[in-house]
Amino acid sequence: MVIPKRSSIQSWKTGGFKTEDRNKSIIFALLIVALLITSTGFAAAKEATIVVKSADTPDNRVVIFSAFSPEKIDIHSGESVTWINFKKPKAPVVLVSADELWEETTLNYGKAFSFTFENPGTYSFTLKDNPDIKGTVTVLAGESQNASSENSVGTTVTAEKAQVQSNPDSSMKNLEVKNKENVENKENVKNKENVKNKEKIAIYSTTLTPNLIEIEKGSTVSWVNYKRPKGSSVLVSEDGLWEKQTINYGKAFSYTFENSGTYTFSLEGVPEAKATVVVK
């Protein structure tokens, strides 16, 4: 029979072996706590990032106070509009597209949401909890100021948006001033276009928009290709003013009308796509 040493017996009696198990449990618990703290930090960092649905054009902003400012905004097809929540007292809002262009989107205070409008038309938006607060976006056919923008989830946040996020109160006045400047700039652009006597007709898959315009002799008309999916279109002058013109996506063809008359144009292979230019 083997008799254990006295020191071993003493360790067993005093709970020496139990002490080792207890230490292992404590170390394991500390590791779990450390992992929880680390994962919580990552989650907080992720939550602090502004996620924008599409690349935005800095000229086109709608600020949400107790109402939309501005309530109406005009853009060109292919441009984006950004909504920023500055509601007071600070609270989240739910932005709703009356035309179901996007799903209901919740914006916390200081956060932004962008959407790119591809097709001409008038679109309405409102707040879910305040349906009486309404606004409209009118999308005009013509060359986009942001033609290279494409819809994308998780677009990199611009420095300006980072400033809005970090200090939205101080950014609010700057946005109001820029909105006024943008309105004035657009008016100046329109006046310049009128002086140049240029008109535009947008080419889509099966339509020409507008399909009827009236101009003065010496005026120029430009046909711009916005066909989707992206592809070339062949513009035909049914009066033989020019040979068939192939226009790639995003490109334009222009013609100056020197003589009075009524002229008809169409897309090759798309007989329903026609437009008329009346020269006075």
Image (tube, rainbow, N blue to C red):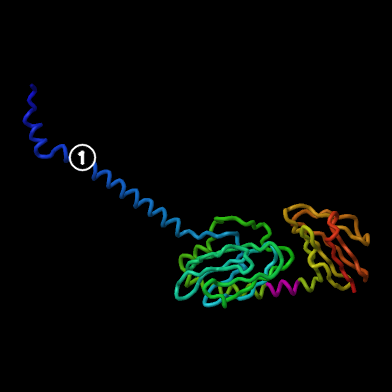
Q: At 54% from the left edge and 56% from the top edge, which residue is drawn? A: 156
Left or right of 253: which side holds 116?
A: left
Q: Residue furthest front?
A: 1
| Number of marks in picture | 1
Vertical comparison of 34 with 149: above or below: above
Q: Nearer the viewer, residue 92 or 221?
A: 92
Q: Quadrant of residue 3?
A: top left
Point out the stretch of residues depicted in magenta: 186-192
Q: Is residue 252 left or right of residue 119?
A: right
- Please state which of residues 244 and 36 is positioned toward the viewer in this rendering: 36
- Quadrant in the picture for the C terminus: bottom right
Say what secondary structure mark 1 lies in.
Answer: helix
Check disc 1: other Cα within 10 Å, few if <14, some if 14-19, many if 20+. Answer: few
Where is residue 257? Give x, y as percent: 89, 67
Residue at image location 47% in from the left, 72% down from the top: 169
Q: Which quadrant holds the N terminus?
A: top left
Give the camera-side residue of 21 and 218. Answer: 21
- Residue at 52% x, 73% y is 129
Q: Which residue is mark 1?
A: 21
At which x and y percent is residue 244?
88, 55
State the residue lying farthest toward the top.
1
Who is closer to the viewer here, 164 or 84?
84
Amino acid type of the residue that numbered disc 1 sits on in the rendered structure: Asp
Residue 142 location, x and y as percent?
74, 65
Residue 45 falls inside the magenta stretch = no
Magenta span: chief secondary structure: helix
Residue 255 at x, y percent in the picture: 86, 63
